[in-house]
Amino acid sequence: MARFAGKKEKETPGLNMGSMSDIIFMLLFFFMVITSMRENTLVTTNVPMGTEVAKLEDPSNACTVYIGVPEDKQKYGTNPRIQVNDQLSKKDDIIPFIEMQRSQHSRLMEDGTNAADQLTTIIKADKTVPMGLINDVKQELRQAGALRLFYNAAEDAKRKQQQQ
Amino acid sequence: MADISFLLLAFFLMVSDIKTDKGIARVLPPIPKENAEKPEIHQRNIFTVLVNSEDRILTTTATGGLEPCSIDQLKGRVKTFLNSNRGENPMLPDLEPTDIEGLGTYKVSKGVISLQCHNSTSYDKYFQVQNELTAAITELRNELSAAKFGRSNYMDLPNAKENNLRKAVEKAVPMAISEAKPSNMGGTN
């Protein structure tokens, strides 16, 4: 039986790496689909925690206004500021910002309405920001006719559990 | 090839983040037209919530005065005020029988919560108050949903175009929050 008597030391065959790139590409596409580009924030936004938070109904039809203390305190000071369009802004910049967002989100919906009319403004504000500033922003949004607001917050799972 | 794809993967992991868009949705009132008449609201239909510059809360009492309120008490008080599943009470808001599709005639409370905060109230406190108000209204909606449709969470109700039971419950217990312009009352800046 010479056929079976052959060499005794068998080498384990090396792992075929040919399909590795396919797997990694698949992972890459998966991440590209589930994530979105990180937005450049110039202000710290430590959002409040709540128990009644819900998901945004239509995340694609939304724009964000950041409010908080600038990260670069030496350059911009320590007063809370508004950030739209990746830059620190004054409250007068909000109406042009909303108009720009409207034109970007303008498309015809199934029921014949324009999606831009349903544009939601996400307010991503730091806990410590005084309401005076937030109310200025809200007033500007009213002037611009962007009435749908969304106060961004984190879910307080601990408190929710305690209540149940 | 694998190296390139690894590089791309690492790059995407760096520049992207998973969006966690959670929060509380609200609708702002439109700017009133000039010479528009102010709607008259009877005192008994208003539940005032004041938050001062030191983040302390005052609410209306049954007798019409104001009394301090902790954040934990707020939800209970709002629920008693807005609950329409009760008899006529001169201290609590008017109940208006309304025809709602899917619910039949339901006594809808005409109560409105008037929320007013100071210019230096912290956003955190304001958010916590909004959170409690949402909790109170959600609980009332859930109670109604459990009593009428046997679902303890009204968000589980069907909301198709026809027979929109969720919308019916939302109409029966409206999100009636009115926000006054902030003032400088109640403390110094």
Image (tube, coloured by chain):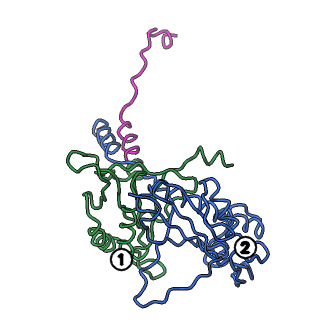
Is residue A53 inside the magenta stretch?
no
> Which corner quadrant of the image does residue B59 belong to?
bottom right
Magenta-highlighted residues: A1-30
- Residue type at mark 2: give it: Ser
Picture coordinates of residue B94 (x, y %)? 69, 80
| Total count of labels | 2
Between the residue at mark 2 and the residue at mark 1, the CA separation in whole angstroms equals: 35 Å
| Residue shown at 73% from the left, 68% from the top | B144
Name above or below for residue A35 compared with residue B148.
above
Say few, some or many: other residues with alpha carbon within 10 Å of mark 2 (under 14 / 14 to 19 / 20 or more).
Answer: many
Where is residue A1 drawn, in percent x and y? 52, 10
Looking at the image, do the residues carrying marks 2 and 1 touch, with CB atoms under 8 Å apart? no
Q: Which chain is green?
A: A
**Residue A14 drawn in magenta:** yes
Where's residue A147, x and y in %? 43, 73
**Helix, strand or loop for disc 1:** helix
B23 relative position to A160: left or right = left
Residue that label 1 marks: A143
**Residue at position x 31%, y 59% from top?**
A82
The quarter holding residue B120 reads: bottom left
Outermost residue toward the left?
Answer: A75
Instruction: State the SS at label 2.
Output: loop
Residue B145, by quadrant, is bottom right
Residue B34 sits above or below residue B68 on the image:
below
* Percent x, y of residue A55: 51, 59
Res B84 label: 2
Q: In the image shown, does B62 or A68 lie closer to the viewer?
A: B62
What residue lies at 73% left-to-right and 64% top-to-bottom? B143
Amino acid type of disc 1? Gln
Q: Which chain is blue?
A: B
Mark 1 crowd level (few <14, some 14–19, many ≥20, 10 Å Cα): some
- In the displayed structure, does residue B22 sit left or right of residue A106? right
